[in-house]
Image (cartoon, helix red, strand yellow):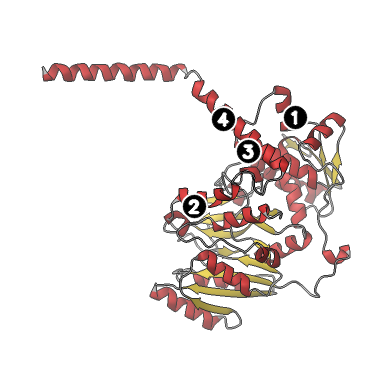
Amino acid sequence: MTVGGVPLAAFPVPPEYRVAGVHPSPTADTSDRVRLALEQLHAERRFARVEFPADGGLGLRAVQAKRAGLAFADVTLAIRLDTCGAWRRQAEQRWPRGYDEVEADFAERWAFEHADERVTPDAELLAFVKRLGWDVGEALLPRIQPSEAGVPRPPGPPLVTVGIAHFNLGRHLPETLAALAAQTYPHVEVIAIDDGSTDPASVAAFAEMEARYPHWRFLRQANAGIGATRNRCLELARGEFFIPVDADNLPRPEMVERFVTAAVRNPDLAAMSCYFLAFADGAGNPPAEFLHALRPTGGPHVLAGIRNVYGDANAVFRTDVFRSIGGYGTDRGTSCEDWEAFVTLVHAGHRIGVIPDHLFYYRHLPGGFSRRTNWYANHNRVLRHFTGTAGLTPEDAAGLWAALLGFHQRLEQLENAVPPRRHRVADAVHSLATRVRRAFRRGVRS
């Protein structure tokens, strides 16, 4: 593969992108590398237009970056629809074989629909993707500020409310609040709520932070759980945008500013998540070593019951929209309330975007709540929102059943496949050894 005539392998990979993702994605990972290579080339050559093939979703991350205001502001990003995964599968008369193919379908469609320009030389292929539900009308151009589109905005930069639910994390809270105090975006109110901490050191640390940051709000309540505590922050929020921040994570200095820029540019989106880098205690501040990364794609929603395609709770929400769906679920004893919140927003008819940038560091604690709770129960908390086809568009429902059928057929193929010769030999040796041992035992007993 080449980018601007240069082999993709010739471009250095930034250190952050060398950190393995917790959900490796051939489509999204390659698209990230293409986007980063293009950014390097654009700095040298100043492209006016870049054209991607729709096939493989290579333009996904570049288009996401432009929509978020990260890159390519002066470049026309075009997608050429010569073929796509679903078109090839129809010719082969088969269904998707697994998660990666369904994710690639999403990347192809999303990049095509949101590109600055669409090139569609094949009328038959265009009619085919239209039947699949693709928007084949005018391109959904990167959003502009509503004030520029004739929609009035309040004067001045929008206020952002950062909500922090704190429970027995006093050891880490000072670093988190210091990172918020160092944000490059100045129009921020912080609401920190102690959710009935039982650790004396954490209670003392919370009081110390209250004295250190008198211009922020510090509240205390009887233990109610993280969902209820975040909802109280949401209820008290005065900001147009709401950003929940875990009390042990480390926001990068530009996090709020980039969230606001992206949210203002995309008034059609209810929320936008981002990438993060996970680190263990002792990795420094800022961390120097990382355990893994999370780089969500933002879809496809048909697979959001299998895993979280949307991102972490540390995202930006439109306060009024998030309130309208009731905020977070308040179940006790289970985690994944962030995943559930994204699904609830989508089922209410809203859309989620992704900022393709690592905007915060996620502290991975072995005793963290998501690791102490039962994963079956956590996952079931999300899965209950997919009862029947509730919240799915007709196209998503059709895609879901096609994916399930494809997964089932792939499982059957694997179950019915003839084992490789080395496996058959190993099984025969194991069977022979078992018979010899049994015969030896019978001889000893006799």
Nearer to us of marks 1 and 3 is 1
* Residue highlighted by disc 1: 87
Q: Is residue 163 left or right of residue 185?
A: left
Nearer to us of marks 3 and 4 is 4
Q: Are marks 3 and 2 in contact (CB under 8 Å)?
A: no
Residue that appears at 55% across and 51% down: 382
Look at the image and tell me in which quarter the C terminus lies.
top left
* Residue highlighted by disc 3: 26
Nearer to us of marks 1 and 2 is 2
Residue that appears at 53% across and 25% down: 412
Residue that appears at 74% across and 60% down: 262
Mark 1: give few (<14), some (14-19) or many (20+) Cα within 10 Å: some
The type of residue carrying mark 4 is His
Judge by depth and name the residue closer to the eye, 98 or 24.
98
Q: Give the mark nearer the N terminus: 3 vs 2.
A: 3
* Residue highlighted by disc 2: 378
Where is residue 186? Give x, y as percent.
69, 74
The Cα atoms of the two marked residues, 2 and 4, are separated by 24 Å
Q: Residue 345 appears in which quarter of the rendering?
A: bottom right
Q: Are marks 1 and 2 in contact (CB under 8 Å)?
A: no
* Residue highlighted by disc 4: 408
Where is residue 166? Give x, y as percent.
50, 70
The Cα atoms of the two marked residues, 1 and 4, are separated by 20 Å
Tag 1's secondary structure? helix
Nearer to us of marks 3 and 2 is 2
Residue ranking furthest to the left: 446
The type of residue carrying mark 2 is Asn
Where is residue 30? Give x, y as percent.
67, 40
Residue that appears at 48% across and 69% down: 224
The Cα atoms of the two marked residues, 1 and 3, are separated by 19 Å
